Image: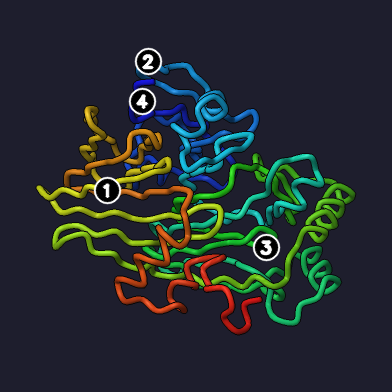
């Protein structure tokens, strides 16, 4: 097959917490009027799967390409029931509901192939913006349940300051929320499983009856993990040359996310052996995967199939790049070579502490 960079259809969610920042701040065109809470940039979620928009593969579902051509599309011998990565832009003009996502084991108990670990890269945040992430030390299940029913979230959850340019890796089972005034690029496992603690629907704000609300909280508590207390990190820089850099924002067994920045007139070239999800965080950028050259508009995304093998960006460029990492080859080894210590690398996510390190198990 003659592979080329894929533009995909993009599901749009107009949940009650959304605003207009994806259009007004990021410059995304073609969005409907009203609130825009989320754009699902690359999605193979059941019922919300993308299809190819342009070229010889136009109209082909992402799921079909994944199942029929896993090596050429995803790469590295990957096999699975759907494309493994989901990426979004999220506008938390108002706070997101307090919620969590199932881990892989809990998801399989519900008949789903996997759960959802995720990470947020903060694109913009108003002064004083915060996020709720994980429980305070010593909080037990009954105390947490009581606080959720009282809607006294600060009594039991950690509230962290949010700043543009930082990234947070959120393991499945971690209670969390962010907003108001927060614009995020999110990468995660392909899943839409979630349990909410709120007494209303996130889609339209409609009130839940008490029986449904209490049942939701009990379901949430069955999947809650008390241990994760993640912290925002600034990312680790990998200079390419004096006019270009890669910043490794987060990494773990399910995904890695980087931010690539290239000065005007300069070029960044990068080989790859696994699919890249490239989302534009800046001005329109010229992107080449030989022999294909195209322009990636503001807040648009491309899926670069693994078979393309390499990409060239001409500056000015400011893009976010998600992929399935080999943690040793793609993350630990280049960051060690750049002079970073084990603690700094391990802070990027899960699975990055070398085996045998005391206290890691």
Q: Is residue 269 left or right of residue 36?
A: left
Q: Measure the C-alpha gap from mark 3 to mark 2.
A: 43 Å
| Residue drawn at 63 percent across, 50 percent down | 116
Q: Nearer the viewer, residue 334 or 108?
A: 334
Q: Which residue is mark 1?
A: 270
Give residue 175's mark.
3
Labels 1 & 2 near each other (Cβ < 8 A): no
Marks 3 and 4, the one that precedes in the sequence = 4
Q: Give me the residue at 74% from left, 51% from top.
A: 195
Q: Contact (CB < 8 A) between labels 3 and 2?
A: no
Viewer-side label of 1, 3:
1
Q: Nearer the viewer, mark 4 or mark 2?
A: 4
- In whole angstroms, how far apart are the C-alphas of marks 1 and 2? 25 Å
Which of the marked residues, 1 or 2, is nearer the chain's N terminus?
A: 2
Residue identifier under label 4 = 3
Foreground tag (3 vs 2): 2
Q: Secondary structure at mark 3?
A: loop
């Amino acid at each position: 097959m003659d592979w080329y960079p894929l533009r995909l259809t993009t599901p749009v969610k107009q949940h009650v917490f959304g605003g207009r920042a994806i259009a007004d701040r990021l410059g995304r065109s073609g969005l409907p009027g009203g609130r825009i809470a989320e754009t699902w940039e690359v999605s193979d979620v059941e019922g919300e799967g993308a299809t190819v928009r342009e070229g010889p593969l136009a109209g082909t579902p992402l799921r079909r390409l994944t199942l029929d051509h896993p090596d050429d599309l995803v790469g590295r011998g990957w096999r699975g029931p759907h494309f493994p990565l989901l990426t979004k832009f999220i506008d938390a003009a108002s706070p997101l509901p307090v919620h969590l996502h199932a881990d892989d084991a809990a998801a399989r108990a519900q008949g789903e192939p996997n759960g959802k670990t995720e990470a947020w890269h903060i694109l913009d945040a108003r002064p004083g913006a915060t996020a709720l992430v994980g429980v305070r030390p010593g909080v037990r299940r009954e105390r947490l349940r009581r606080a959720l029913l009282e809607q006294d979230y600060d009594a039991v959850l950690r509230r962290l300051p949010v700043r543009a340019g930082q990234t947070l890796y959120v393991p499945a089972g971690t209670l969390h929320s962010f907003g108001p005034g927060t614009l995020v690029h999110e990468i995660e496992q392909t899943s839409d499983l979630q349990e909410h603690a709120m007494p209303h629907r996130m889609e339209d704000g409609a009130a839940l009856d008490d029986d449904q609300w209490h049942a939701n909280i009990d379901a949430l508590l069955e999947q809650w993990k008390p241990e994760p207390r993640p912290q925002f990190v600034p990312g680790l820089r990998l200079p390419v040359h004096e006019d270009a850099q890669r910043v490794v924002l987060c990494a773990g067994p399910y995904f890695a996310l980087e931010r690539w920045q290239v000065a005007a007139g300069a070029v960044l070239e990068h080989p790859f052996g696994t699919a890249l999800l490239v989302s534009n965080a800046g001005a329109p950028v010229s992107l080449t995967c030989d022999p294909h050259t195209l322009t990636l508009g503001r807040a648009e995304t491309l899926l670069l199939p693994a078979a393309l093998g390499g990409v060239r960006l001409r500056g000015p460029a400011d893009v976010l790049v998600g992929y399935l990492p080999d943690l040793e080859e793609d993350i630990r080894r280049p960051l060690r070579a750049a002079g970073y210590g084990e603690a700094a690398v391990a802070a990027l996510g899960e699975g990055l502490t070398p085996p045998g390190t005391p206290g890691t198990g």
